[in-house]
Amino acid sequence: MIGLDTNVLIRYIVRDDDRQAKVATKLIESSCTADDPGFVNLVVLCEISWVLGRGYQYDRQTVAAVIRGLLTSVELEVEASETVWRALRAFEQGKADFADAFIGAHNRAQHVSPTYTFDRKASNLADFVLLGTKS
């Protein structure tokens, strides 16, 4: 099993750099199979959501579709996929970004709940509690 970094997957998904996209495509399509999938770790997944949303201005639905595509690909293995599915559902239903949805879902999977935050959007997720800033 090989690991795939954020920039390799972004080039494969976005194809904004022709040379790098060809190299990424060749690597993924020749080295990642159902029997020997490429590994996508949690940090890479959160970076992908951030880069697509902030850097490429992809809307929430498109970011969710990309994450869903990574999760359902038999040629890729996403770390903690059950937790990622839970985070994806929360992301699709709320206003918080995917990384926040994942933080809440991951903490819950680790039997840590609630997660306290100053982030109002994250606090709308089931696993978060907003901390007040008044003393």
Image: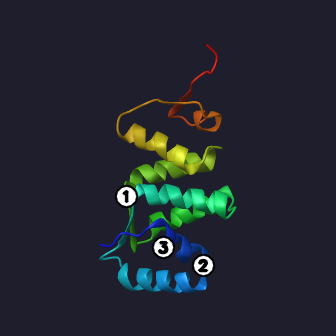
Please report the residue visible at 42 percent of the width from the left and 43 percent of the height from the top.
106
Which residue lies at the image location 67% right of the left edge and 65% below the top edge? 56
Q: Residues within 10 Å of mark 3 (few under 14, many from 20)?
A: some
Label 2: which secondary element: loop
**Nearer the camera: disc 1 or disc 2:** 2
Residue occupying image coordinates x 52% and y 62%: 68
Q: Is the C terminus in the top left, top right, bottom left or bottom right quadrant?
A: top right
Q: Is residue 95 above or below residue 75?
A: above
Give the Cα separation between the discs numbered 3 and 2. Answer: 10 Å
Q: Residue at x 57, y 24 (%)?
A: 131
96 to 6, vertically: above or below: above
Amino acid at dot 2: Arg
**Badge 1 or badge 2: first in the primary sequence:** 2
Which quadrant of the structure image shows residue 13?
bottom right
> Residue 109's spot in the image, x, y percent?
37, 41
Disc 1 on helix, strand or loop? loop
34 on left or right of 129? left
Image location (x, y in percent) of residue 35: 30, 77
- According to the picture, the residue beneath numbered tag 2 turns out to be 15
Residue 28 location in percent, x, y?
Answer: 43, 80
Query: Mark 1–mark 3 contact, CB under 8 Å?
Result: no
Q: Which residue is mark 1?
A: 79
Determine the secondary structure under disc 3.
Answer: helix
Quadrant position of the N terminus in the picture: bottom left
How busy is the neighbourhood of tag 2: few (under 14 within 10 Å), some, or many (20 plus)?
A: some
- Locate residue 110 relative to residue 70 in the image: left or right: left
| 130 to 12, vertically: above or below | above
Q: As shown in the figure, which amino acid type bears the numbered disc 1? A: Glu
Three-letter code, disc 3: Val
Name the residue carrying label 3: 8
Q: Earlier in the sequence, mark 1 or mark 3?
A: 3
Between 11 and 92, the one lying in front of the other is 11
